[in-house]
Amino acid sequence: MHILDIRNVRKSFGDNEVLKDISLTVDRGEVVSVIGPSGSGKSTFLRCATLLETMDSGTLRYMGETVASMQGDRIVYTKDLKKIRSYFGLVFQNFNLFPHFSVMKNVTDAPISVQKRDPKEVRETARELLDKMGLGDKADAYPCELSGGQKQRVSIVRALAMKPEILFFDEPTSALDPELTGEVLKVIRQLADASMTMVIVTHEMAFAHAISDFVVFMDGGVIVEQGTPQELFEGTKQERTRQFLQNYQR
Amino acid sequence: MTFSTMVGELAHAFINTFLIFLLTLIGSLPLGLVVYFGKKSRFKPLKWLTEVYISIMRGTPLILQIMVIYYAPPLLFHVTLPGNWRFSAVVVAFVINYAAYYAEIYRGGIESIPVGQYEAAQVLGYRKTQTFVKIILPQMVKRTLPAVTNEVITLVKDTSLASAIGTIEMFTKAKQIAVSPRSPGMLTFLVAGIFYYIFNVIVAFGMKKLEKALDYYQ
Ligand SMILES: Nc1ncnc2c1ncn2[C@@H]1O[C@H](COP(=O)(O)OP(=O)(O)O)[C@@H](O)[C@H]1O
Ligand SMILES: [Mg+2]
């Protein structure tokens, strides 16, 4: 059983066909990086997988459960999205923390009020996670009091506190000052070491090379190439991939 | 009439001024939210109706609205209204007028909240009402507080419009006193002005405190 199984995704905005038949499966413990030039549809793809956008056509399954499928030429989404949403978490480029909640409340509110878990257990879990991410002393702080790197780590903790099966990241370090990206990448690496299943859209090529089991290269709404980091970064046969990667070599 | 009797009578009439003020806030602040939802409704007739309502409330003088609400029901429906209708009509007119303004202020506040807040809430599984109540509403309150403060201060002064239909409140009282024989005359209006001013200073102070209390985040 795949954790995520998304197939033949098509998505247009008006006349602009942004995703042209994209498919991806992710199994437990896998780390998949998605790379590609800006505007190639990476975010739209993640947004389709996390139900922030509806696909025009395609199928979507989490944990073997069908979320969306084709009936004839119409796409049909299941009614019970609440359970499906508990399977995944999403870390945004610009954090999207709730500014009026303390760090602790940002992390614990959804597990308590959405998942109806025991508040005591949730708070203990939150403390452990915050400690692990080097945020042990920030539980009572408000987002505006944190650096970008700290905000992003809090948003990762917020996603983890929901105990998702899979975690999506959309350019988690792109909004950060260069000197702050390291602390966030370190945390994601920690998660990879702990076998968290992850799909990461990133422009950090060295990072993608180091932690991914799989790399997907997207361009113009299609997956041009996918394979192991070695296959893509060291021995790509595709001209487009080569060109793209060249822009990232200094 | 002595000066101190005049001040005493104004102070007594101020109770009604304060009541109009308070009842208007209690009614219009929440009603503004209802009006906002009406305007945002996907049910088109409701949306249009709300838009016409807001536009009339903002496009005609409040003093006229007070008179219409006071005089229209007896004329249109030939009903005799209870003795305190005068006061009720004023409060009703103020509530529906201010609700229209608050609805627009709320709309501005809500639309200024980044869409990422909704998206984060959706991914975390919050239902629509939960998202509104827990995530959007508190941020809206903070963002609209300065504009709301302006309206509240205007309301203190607007209460004097109740005198258009002779509702007993401080301004009506001041007019009565000023024209009565052997009264302090124009001095009465000066004192009334001081009452309004002091009340507004207190209101502004209270609102500042409220803004400060919400300063713990940005
Ligand atoms: N909500 C939207 N409405 C219209 N066009 C959009 C929307 N979101 C994305 N697009 C377009 O889709 C294309 C792919 O965007 P995106 O998925 O954000 O790419 P990437 O994340 O790879 O930079 C772009 O041309 C972008 O302008
Ligand atoms: Mg993007």
Image (cartoon, helix red, strand yellow):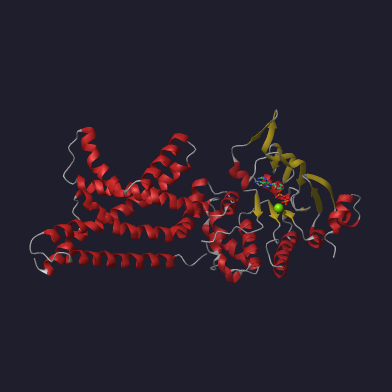
Percent across and percent down for residue A165 are 68, 51
The answer to which quarter of the image holds residue B20 is bottom left
Picture coordinates of residue B125, whole percent (x, y)? 57, 48
Position of A154 with respect to B40 (left or right) is right
Q: Residue furthest top?
A: A72
A155 left or right, relative to B159: right
* Badge count: 0
Q: Residue A230 location in percent, x, y?
A: 88, 56
- Residue drawn at (75%, 40%) of the image: A7
Q: Residue at x 37, y 57 (%)?
A: B151
Q: Quadrant of residue A78?
A: top right
- In the image, taking residue A216 as reference, residue B188 lies left or right, namely left
Residue at the (81%, 53%) spot, across then down: A215
Q: Quadrant of the N terminus of chain B?
A: bottom left
Vertical relation: A203 (above or below) B103: below
Q: Splitting the image into 4 quarters, where does residue A136 fall?
A: bottom right
Residue B106, compared with residue A139, is above or below; it is above
Q: Is residue A64 visible?
A: no
Q: In this orientation, which residue lies closer to the viewer: A137 or A49?
A: A49
State the residue at coordinates (65%, 60%).
A156
Determine whether, in the image, residue A130 is placed left or right of residue A58.
Answer: left
Q: Position of residue A229 (x, y in %)?
A: 85, 56
